[in-house]
Image: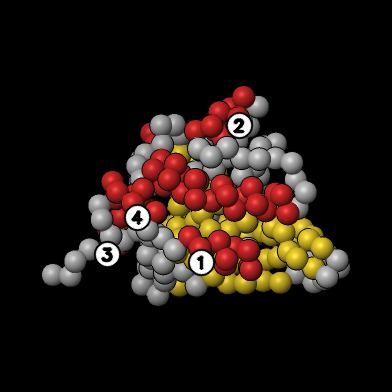
Amino acid sequence: MNAPRHPPITDVAGRIAALDWARIGADLDAQGHAMIAGLLDPLECAALAGLYPRGELFRSRVVMGRHGFGRGEYQYFGYPLPEPVAGLRTELYPWLVAIANRWNAAMGIATIYPDEHADFIARCHAAGQCRPTPLLLQYGPGDYNCLHQDLYGEHVFPLQVAILLSEPGCDFDGGEFVLTEQRPRMQSRAEVVPLRQGDAVVFAVQQRPVQGTRGVYRVNLRHGVSRVRAGSRHTVGIIFHDAL
């Protein structure tokens, strides 16, 4: 029998600490997103996707077609967040906060994020942003997610993480994760991120700094999912700010 690719999911902190954060930071600086291969294994992915029917775990359900968001649906987890969602959110944040603060400094944004996620959530809650934002998304044939930004209020952490829970070519076809980038006075650039089951992508929520010939400028980003041609696709999204 093959050894598991990871320690038990209870060791989420060690798993995240073992990642190549220098490479992740460099990729984020260069292109606004970074892939993490195999963050979760297939059994962990199946367990997370299997939470979708458990309505007691969620605070709200959104049918995208009713709001012009696309087709498909998603549910926001309620507090207390289930594991491993809570652990992923808490343990990823300290590794991303240095990048977030560096980006804000480069873009001339005065906001400085605290070192610990609990302190940032306290800041959100003091401003009335008290609703948790981690979510589980479900797509079937013909479903898609329009390009968007997950903002939710005044306090926005500039990076978020999506983890694909289904296997392309086996569980579903199509449904590629898509990012677009709009630079000033230029046409939009699109990129497809080739995720496999258990892979994560870290990406900019709204904007990132880019060094130009006349200094640093801000680039706007949006993300979405292309049309699922067959099968069923599940994703978990880890957003670090809470919502109004």
Can you identify the residue that label 1 sits on? Answer: 23
Q: How far apart are labels 2 and 4 at the CA level? A: 27 Å
Q: Looking at the rendering, in which quadrant would you find the C terminus?
A: top right
Q: Quadrant of residue 126?
A: top right
Q: Nearer the viewer, mark 4 or mark 3?
A: 4
Q: Position of residue 10 (x, y in %)?
A: 28, 46
- Which of the pair 78/99 is nearer the observer? 99
- Name the image quarter holding residue 242: top right
Say which residue appears at 65% left-offset and 27% top-offset.
127
Name the spot of residue 241 as percent of width and height, x first: 58, 40
Quadrant housing residue 169: bottom left
User: What separation in Å lies between label 2 and label 3 (alpha carbons)?
Assistant: 36 Å
The residue carrying mark 2 is 124
The earlier-in-sequence mark between 4 and 1 is 4
Q: CA distance from mark 1 to mark 2?
A: 30 Å
In front of the other: label 1 or label 2? 1
The relative height of residue 159 versus residue 193 in the rendered view (above or below) is above
Amino acid type for the residue under numbered disc 3 = Arg
Asked if residue 212 shows in the view, the reply is yes
Describe the element under mark 3 as helix, strand or loop. loop
Label 1 neighbour load within 10 Å: few <14, some 14-19, many 20+: few
Identify the mark nearer the N-term, 1 or 2: 1
- Residue 192 in picture, x, y percent from top left: 58, 72
